[in-house]
Image (spheres, rainbow, N blue to C red):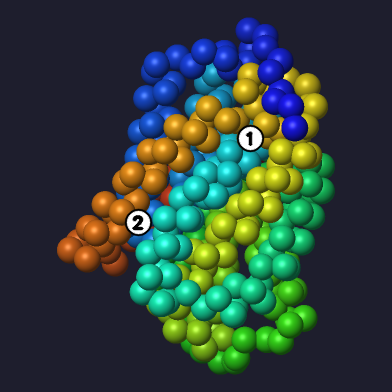
Amino acid sequence: MALQTPYSPHTLSPMLDPVLILELAALGLCTGYLAGLLGIGGGMLIGPFMTLIMSTQGVSADLAVKMAIATSMATIIFTSVSSVRAHHKRGAVRWDIVKGLAPGIVLGGAIGSMGIFAVLKGTTLALIFAAFISFSATQMYLDKKPKPGRDMPGTLGQLGAGGIIGLISGLVGAGGGFISVPFMVACNVAIINAVATSAALGFPIALANAAGYAISGHGLAGLPAWSLGYIWLPALAVIAACSVTTAPLGAKMAHSLPVAKLKRVFALVLYCLAAYMLWKGLHG
């Protein structure tokens, strides 16, 4: 698939400004560290900040939101691999659940990223993103955990659950952990296995949706230079490279810092980011 390289004074230059590279690197470093420390996906951080960065670089508000979500999702392809390897070594990943949910995730992701995502305006997606962040922040602040009340559903049930996870993830550019972990815990899957399995599910979620973003945005007018559909490759490269290096540091610090208290503080940060995306959605 050919890269989209239209250029005008209102799009990002093919030659990245050093300040812009530093901004993307800082975002990647912080995202990776917090993901390892708090066990959260990077999409909730990358999405709002990428929207801000691209807006200040002259990309239209509607396109900036879509590209931020798409690029955020694409970074999960790389960051999920190192996380899955660590969990797999500990024998924590429930690969039987991965096999059951993955087909639905791919289908839901395709519908979301190639269909709904392409049709909806960026401002509408910003409102959906704001609602998702607010919900996730509330869960994190209250540290609410669902009570086990059922077993994992059968093949059709897992197909449907995976479809919902993939669809919602595709619309907000997140790895799906805030949906899949509560779902699995409610189905009597131990929390450690649910977290590890969610990390493994992040790869098919990201891969399916990233492919959808690349296809649905192919040939779109006004894309910045070095775009693969809605995915902006320079940001993907910088953020992914930096986040992979700091994620293990965050995971190591998680054993010595008061993570429960840090999650509450971070939840307040998420509320601020949700407010920004709400403003972006309402005012463009």
Residue displayed at 22% across by 66% down:
255
Quarter location, residue 239: top left
Q: Which percent across, then down, holds residue 53?
A: 50, 27
Identify residue type, mark 1: Ile
Q: Is residue 179 above or below residue 271?
A: below
Q: Give yes or no for contact between labels 2 and 1 (Cβ–Cβ under 8 Å).
A: no
Decide if residue 10 is in sight here.
Answer: yes
Quarter location, residue 92: bottom left
Residue displayed at 42% across by 62% down:
85
Q: Nearer the viewer, residue 256 or 134?
A: 256
Neighbourhood count class around disc 1 (C-alpha, 10 Å): few under 14, some 14–19, many 20 upward: many
Identify residue type, mark 2: Gly
Left or right? Give the position of 193 relative to 7.
left
Residue displayed at 34% across by 51% down:
247
Q: Nearer the viewer, residue 201 or 8?
A: 201
Residue ranking furthest to the top? 9
Residue to which mark 1 is pinned: 231
Label 1: which secondary element:
strand
**Which of the numbered marks, if any, corresponds to residue 36?**
2
Q: Nearer the viewer, residue 219 or 142?
A: 219
Q: Which percent across, then down, holds residue 186?
A: 54, 84
Q: Which percent across, then down, holds residue 81?
A: 47, 55
The quadrant of the rendering that contains the N terminus is: top right
Neighbourhood count class around disc 2 (C-alpha, 10 Å): few under 14, some 14–19, many 20 upward: many
